Image: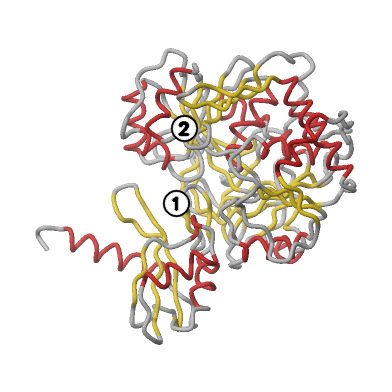
Amino acid sequence: MDAIFDQGPPPPCPVPFNLAAYVLAHASALRAKTALSVISPEGADSWTYGALEAAVLGAATGLLEQGLIPGDRLLMRLGNSVEFPICYLAAIAAGIIPVPTSPLLTQTEVSRIAEEIEPELIVAEAGVAVPANPPCSVLEAEAFRASYGLAPARYALGDPESPAYIVYTSGTSGQPRAVTHAHRAIWARRMMWDGWYGLTEDDRLMHAGSFNWTYTLGTGLLDPWSRGATALIPAKGVTPDQLGGLIETHDATMFAASPGVYRQLLRTPPGRCLALRHGLSAGEKLPDATRAAWTAATGTPVYEAFGMSECSTFVSGSPSRPAPPGTLGYPQDGRRVAVLGENGPVPFGEPGVLGIAHGDPGLMLCYWGAEAETAARFDGPWFLTGDLVSMAPDGALAYLGRADDMMNAGGIRVSPIEIENVLNAHPNIAESAAAEVLVKADTTVIAVFYVPKGPVEPAELERHAAENLARYKCPRIYKAVESLPKNPNGKLLRRHLREAYETARSEASDPRA
């Protein structure tokens, strides 16, 4: 039988619709309930649902008074502060398209983004890079905050298929791609409530990420608010060793983080908290040792989810249906996925590329301004993820790796080509290749292998990378080589570099070698 799993169609998205109106639909009934607490060992800065909606709609008025109209793009250059989700929702409430970006991006990177999306306004925090020659006005974060008290705007209700926001992801082309999502994307996230979280209105969901990470924005903020629950976000400066205490002090019922944060937190593991039901993990594969250590420390399981910027998380284990050992879990209710080979779906148990049905409500609209690249990701009725998997007859999916050379940096996908383009621009580099390498059990980093054409020290290359790449994209290892492995057609064989490096490292650490 073909490896296709159909969980049935989800309920249709209401019409008219607005993402921000949906997220804050509980505000009128829960005005006095805490929607958000920014927590630290010193205490909490809390926002009620009433205060949150007032700030969002006041800020929406402020954006309209800046001269923006529905459909305009707003480039967000904000750090780890509550202004990030407020700006995001305020723009969407007014029909404006926000483009949230990492504050770690360099001026070169953000200038390229501004050139592509042509924003009508940039909202920026002090110390966060903005384009070298901004194509529009730059509104400082302090002035943006002043708009919270303005008269509330009305939600711009409309077609759920219309563009709501743009997020950036790296791709195999080597240039970050602008992923355009519709308002309906938030409606699709309902499938995660039971399919991953087990989320209820009574929950207090603590996410360890910063406000400006899309994983935090979705799982840590928008989903709890859509459900009428309370979101808990650590304040800027909170360290991993403090997270366990915050889970207990603030009665978190769920804890969400990337595997890397779990590993750091477990150096000073939390105790058994009566309120905590389980952990949530996404961004990269959770190592079995990390999962076991968390369960031993807290007495609770961790439920893992798999997704991508183009469709968020759509495969997961959950309290009602845990993932079988060695698998990612199951497609969530309302999803239709397939494992595809050259001639369509493959049989159960056979490897292939994971595909998502074109009609999935969480699937992106397009890559902004890249029609050809958008079309290339679709194979008939399927959107190709580029991830290799196999499917059991019950629908459980086992992850087998990437079909390309994409890398993972702390839960964020990074294209090797983007790094190579920067390194190859150095005058003393002939060519280079980036790869994700294993440096110890359950830990990988980005390495770059380069062929020098003149004297060059790794420290110089580190400075060059830091000037042109966000910190999370910068290689941790720089290794000079005489040549790069290629196939007869000249294609770079990055996997050979990774395998050779890991083999050499293993032999060097083996006392029998």
Q: Residue at x 68, y 65 (%)?
A: 132
Q: In the shown orientation, is residue 84 left or right of residue 270?
A: right
Q: Give how far apart the Cα atoms at labels 2 and 1 are.
A: 16 Å
Q: How crowded is mark 1: few (under 14 residues within 10 Å), some or many (20 or more)?
A: some
| Residue placed most toward the observer, 388 or 165 | 165
**Which quadrant, please, contains the N terminus?**
top right
| Amino acid identity at mark 1 | Leu
Measuring 42% from the left and 60% from the top, which residue is drawn there? Answer: 446
Q: What residue type is labelled 2?
A: Ala
Question: What residue is shown at x 46% (from left), y 61% (from top)?
Answer: 474
Q: In which quarter of the image is residue 344?
A: bottom right
Q: Residue 131: which quarter of the image?
A: bottom right
Q: Depth check: 327 or 447 in front?
A: 447
Farthest residue toward the bottom? 453
Residue 76, percent across and down? 70, 49
The residue sitting at 82% across, 31% down in the picture is 57
Q: What element carries label 1?
A: strand
109 and 235: which one is in front?
Answer: 235
Q: Can you identify the residue that label 2 sits on?
A: 323
The answer to whether residue 306 is above or below residue 453 is above
Residue 59 in the image: state x and y as whole percent: 80, 36
Relative to 25, is 259 on the left or the right? left
Instruction: Find disc 1 in the rendering and name its residue.
Output: 400
Q: In the rendering, which numbered label is found on residue 54?
A: none
Q: What element does badge 2 sit on?
A: loop
Rendering coords of residue 330 (x, y %): 54, 35
Between 365 and 332, the residue placed more toward the observer is: 365
Q: How crowded is mark 2: few (under 14 residues within 10 Å), some or many (20 or more)?
A: many
Q: How many marks?
A: 2
Mark 1 and mark 2 in contact (Cβ < 8 Å)? no
